[in-house]
Image (cartoon, coloured by chain):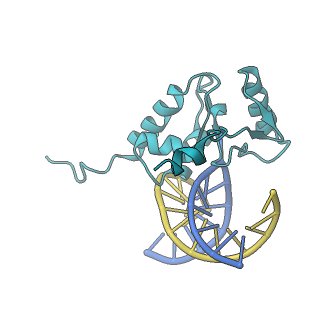
Chain colours: A cyan, B blue, C yellow
DNA sequence: CCCGTGACTCTAC
DNA sequence: CGTAGAGCCACGG
């Protein structure tokens, strides 16, 4: 018999897609919860991504490469997870300052680029 | 079924 | 930079 809703992926399927994206992050590469969700196909699934990580048990999952949209670590400052995440990121050469990862600098000649039109 | 609770995000002040 | 509110999604009571 036909399935009830073939179009909307089950919660399990969503969880799997989210995990796949997180696992695809290379060492030293970081992404926000929202970005992870988007890559997995869920434009508004930031909270979903967070939930999936919170429930994860796989010790090999690179969960530490996922941060808030502004580059800050999501855990409460100085909490267990906070310190652990900062430690893991630095171990990969990521620059973490005040619980925050340096955002990519804008191109120096961005203005020239825009005004050249 | 309503309601509270997050490893969230965006927009307005 | 900081706070407040609203939207968002899955879960558990």
Q: Horizontally, is A13 left or right of A46 in the view?
A: left
Q: Horizontally, is A74 left or right of A29 in the view?
A: right
Number of marks present in the image shown: 0
Residue at image position (83%, 42%) is: A79
Q: Is residue A78 visible?
A: yes
Above or below A20: residue A47:
below
Residue A74 in percent (x, y) is at 71, 46
Above or below A87: residue A97:
below
Residue at image position (79%, 48%) is: A76
Residue A27 in percent (x, y) is at 62, 21
Residue at image position (65%, 39%) is: A108
Q: Quadrant of residue A94?
A: top right
Q: Residue lying furthest left in this view?
A: A1
Residue at image position (60%, 31%) is: A57
Q: Is residue A50 visible?
A: no
Foreground of the two, A5 or B10 = B10
Q: Quadrant of residue A99?
A: top right
Residue A88 in percent (x, y) is at 74, 26
């Amino acid at each position: 018999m036909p399935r009830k809703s073939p179009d909307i992926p089950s919660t399990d399927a969503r969880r799997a897609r989210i995990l796949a994206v997180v696992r695809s992050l290379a060492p030293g590469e970081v992404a926000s919860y929202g970005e992870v969700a988007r890559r997995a196909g869920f434009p508004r699934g930031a909270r979903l991504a967070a939930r999936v990580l919170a429930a994860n048990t796989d010790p090999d999952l690179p969960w530490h490469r996922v941060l808030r949209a502004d580059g800050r670590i999501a855990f409460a400052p100085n909490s267990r997870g906070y310190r652990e995440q900062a430690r893991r990121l630095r171990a990969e050469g990521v620059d973490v300052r005040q619980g925050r990862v340096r955002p990519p600098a804008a191109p120096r000649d961005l203005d020239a680029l825009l005004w050249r039109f």
